[in-house]
Image: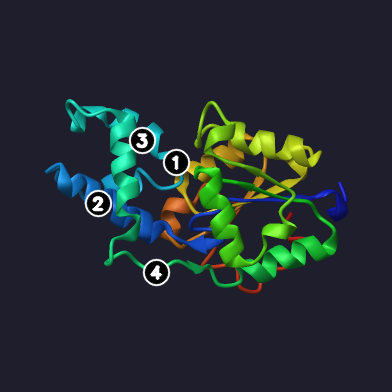
Amino acid sequence: MTPQMKAALFDLDGTLIDTERRSLAMWSLLLDNHGIDHDMALLRGFVGRRGRDVLAEKAALFPGKGIDELFAEVLTYRDHPDLPEIVPVPGAAELVRRVAGFGSPIAVVTSAMRWWAEERLADVGVRDLVRTMVTAEDVTAGKPHPEGFLLGAERLGAAPADCVAFEDSVAGIAAAKAAGMACVAVATTHPDEDLAGADLVVADLTGIDWPLPLF
């Protein structure tokens, strides 16, 4: 396998753009509004996954409430004045440009909706460099299932073993590894020890070379 055959598949929230703290704040507002006690362990269960999937698993916490109703409520908190600012992860744009400049194909595989992914990639300034996106609407099973990463690799015409996935969540790492990919974890949301399933853990994307010498 030569480096030129490699492809890069990026998660979005928490990996390319620092939005997970904002998402956690929104989920916290939902839980608060329904009188549900919660800690960081419960909140982190939402990270890297489709919101509707987690709400389905936590349905017992919201008696009498439907998943679509709850998800719609979460979205109403998007403009809450106390939410953390949305900013790119350090080094994200530079790495995507480095990968593209090398000639390697790029996909984004995210648990977010397509409209959100489009807006956030524009914020980072790399939308035009992403060949394909796999979003929440494109898969039957969300992360930690590997479907999204496998579909991303297929769309890029790359074998999973020739792909490197960049992730920030435990669910995302599990999905990438189940797909047969190497995985770099970005410790923007979880402590390093929670990301031990990845092949490499970094604080952010600053100074990451491409192709990665470890792979």
How many C-alpha atoms fall within 10 Å of the one at disc 4: few (<14), some, or many (≥20)? few
Q: Mark 1 vs mark 4: which is more N-terminal?
A: 1
The picture quadrant where one finds residue 178 is top right
Amino acid on which disc 4 is placed: Glu
Q: Position of residue 132 (x, y in %)?
A: 71, 45
* Residue 126 visible in rendering: yes
Comparing marks 1 and 4, which lies closer to the viewer?
4
Amino acid on which disc 2 is placed: Ser
Q: Which residue is mark 1?
A: 49
Q: Residue at x 74, y 40 (%)?
A: 161
Comparing marks 4 and 2, which lies closer to the viewer?
4
How many C-alpha atoms fall within 10 Å of the one at disc 1: few (<14), some, or many (≥20)? many
Depth order, front residue of 213/50? 50
Q: Residue at x 37, y 60 (%)?
A: 21
Q: Mark 4 vs mark 2: which is more N-terminal?
A: 2
Q: Mark 3 vs mark 1: which is more N-terminal?
A: 1
**Is 143 rendered above or below residue 83?**
above
Q: Could you give the CA–CA distance between mark 1 and mark 4, rounded to whole angstroms? A: 21 Å
Q: Mark 3 vs mark 4: which is more N-terminal?
A: 3
Q: Which residue is mark 3?
A: 54
Q: Secondary structure at mark 1?
A: loop
Q: Mark 1 vs mark 2: which is more N-terminal?
A: 2
Q: Position of residue 200 (x, y in %)?
A: 59, 57
State which quarter of the image contains the C terminus. bottom right
Amino acid on which disc 3 is placed: Val
Q: Could you give the CA–CA distance between mark 3 and mark 1, rounded to whole angstroms? A: 7 Å
Q: Which residue is mark 4?
A: 85
